[in-house]
Amino acid sequence: MQVGYLLAIISVMSQEFFAIAHELSTKDEPFACALVVQTEGSSAAKPGAKAIITARGELIWGWLGGDCLESSTISAAVEALKDGNPRLITIDLTDELSGMPCGGRLWVYIEPVLPKPHLLVVGHGAIAESLAQFAQLLKFRVTVDDPLAAHGKFSGCRIITDDADYSSLEITPHTYVVIATQHKSDHLAIKSALEKGARYIALIASRKRASLVLEYVRGYGFSKEQLRVIRSPAGLDVKAVTPEEIALSVMSEIVAIRRGGTGAPLSTPCTHLHGSSSIG
């Protein structure tokens, strides 16, 4: 009877855990799952105890054994959400100097759950079409904002055609914005992206036109730090010429920024060979 009652409680807790995790994922909200995988000595938490922690450092579901453990776990969870890497942490609750003489030692596995990266393309031409295709191959969620965007050209994308002033753009810190419109209102799209904290903003335009657009944007009073996310010319230097090559260059830069890469070649060219050989 007691075993059955315990299993019923565990079942309900698991259902609640997955329901909340699913809800957060649906809303594209980042969160971390913390799981006690091993304990040693005296500890209120037991293996299998788990919790859900938001990027704001709020434990919104679960219990890990009280303030001693939870404060350390929450801190590690927030860091995991910043770098996107899971980690196994050891918490020594017997250390008087740490201010946590609770007793015991625990190992907690923390798994960050980040939203699918989001590419927002403002524009409808050949470069925009290629960007959308490349991004979907790279598992990005893609939104296209342009009154002339045709559904047939942007299969699998969300299309917005009635956002004249860009005020309704869906932008989060996980959004990468590429503006490829050649419209007079590009500065408004950049302004909206900056205000909403986009991770990356690319303006595809000639140097002369980009200079004019960015001059408008500076007039809105953004700080130098905020303006650093704007890339123009956009992309990595691959001497791109065609729309497809330009799109590849821009998506390569986005991947490098997302993953923390440098964009430099992984190998160095061979300048000379030791010895010689001949064929024929």
Image (cartoon, grey):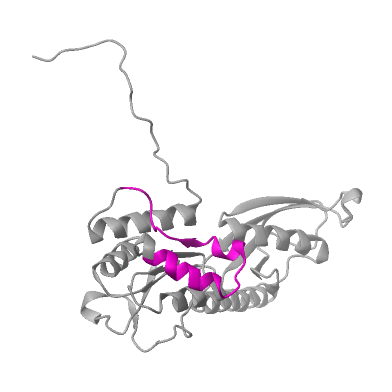
Judging depth in this view, the residue of 256 and 75 nearest the camera is 256
Provide residue 242's location: percent of width, then percent of height: 22, 57
Q: Which residues are magenta?
A: 209-238
At 78% from the left and 65% from the top, the residue drawn is 65
**Which quarter shows the N terminus?**
bottom right
At 78% from the left and 63% from the top, the residue drawn is 71
Judging depth in this view, the residue of 226 and 168 nearest the camera is 226
**Residue 228 part of the magenta segment:** yes
**Which quarter shows the C terminus?**
top left
Provide residue 141's location: percent of width, then percent of height: 39, 71
**Residue 21 part of the magenta segment:** no
Q: Is residue 180 above or below residue 267?
A: below
**Image quarter for residue 245?**
bottom left
Provide residue 46's location: percent of width, then percent of height: 72, 61
Q: Is residue 267 left or right of residue 104?
A: left
At 49% from the left and 73% from the top, the residue drawn is 216
Q: Is residue 270 visible?
A: yes
Judging depth in this view, the residue of 208 and 230 nearest the camera is 208
Residue that protrudes farthest toward the left in the picture: 280
Residue that protrudes farthest toward the right in the picture: 96
Residue that protrudes farthest toward the top in the picture: 275
Q: Is residue 139 visible?
A: no
Provide residue 7's location: percent of width, then percent of height: 62, 73
**Image quarter for residue 206?**
bottom left
